[in-house]
Amino acid sequence: MIAWFSQEARKNKEKFILFLDRDGVINRDSPDFVRKWEDVIIYPDAVEGLRRACGLGARLVIVSNQSGIGRGYISFEDFWDIHRKIAETFAHHNIHFSAAVYCPHHPSDSCLCRKPSPEMILFILNVLGLSPDRSFFIGDRISDMEAASRAGCRGIMLCRNDSPDISKILPKGEYHLASNLIEAVINIEKLLR
């Protein structure tokens, strides 16, 4: 597991924690992996959605499988460059991530951190001293929803226009569906009432 923590994001008191998958949620995913910063296309709704989440008092944490590292497709230098530039891009909009955790392993490595394992989420909850009952996970894969459920978080499945209709095959549990990050945060707003 690779973990990153920010001092900047800890300046405000947050009301809840918002876990976010990266590729497919914050930026466009690629079947060939997001390998370099030049491959990153941030969704237009991501800035507005996360700005709205911060306005509600969210502590933002990225939780992402990055098997391209374990497969040898992405160097650690390029991986950190992508992470740093995503954080900087959102910081220009006064949106700060508190932490990020990544599983760099190949799927065949049988590691303990790869989603659908809840270990990355539980690690962050433990380090930050937070409870899962006030946490949400926005993801675009069934493995995200399984990890959220197993960690005790409420899941919101992002089904973008370019996503297959996976809402019909979601595992049992309470999940909410959204077509973009703004809609996902509006769902959280309603659930916090």
Image: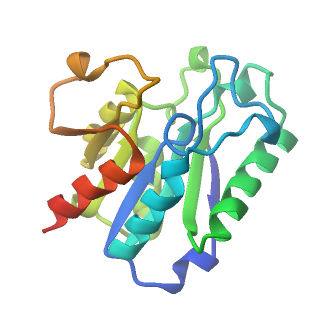
Q: Residue at x 63, y 17 (%)?
A: 31
Q: Position of residue 149 (x, y in %)?
A: 25, 39
On-image quarter of the C terminus: bottom left
Is residue 57 shown to the viewer in this render? Answer: no
**In the rendered view, would you say 142 is above or below 22?**
above
43 and 130: which one is in front?
Answer: 43
Report the side of 56 relative to 34 (left or right). Answer: left
**In the rendered view, would you say 37 is above or below 49?**
above
132 and 57: which one is in front?
Answer: 57
Figure colour scheme: rainbow
Q: Position of residue 73 (x, y in %)?
A: 79, 22
Question: Which quadrant would residue 156 be assigned to in this image?
Answer: top left
16 and 133: which one is in front?
Answer: 16
Q: Residue at x 71, y 31 (%)?
A: 34
**In the rendered view, would you say 18 is above or below 11?**
above
Q: Position of residue 189 (x, y in %)?
A: 23, 63
Question: Which quadrant would residue 76 be assigned to in this image?
Answer: top right
193 and 70: which one is in front?
Answer: 193
Q: Residue at x 59, y 34 (%)?
A: 28
On-image quarter of the N terminus: top right
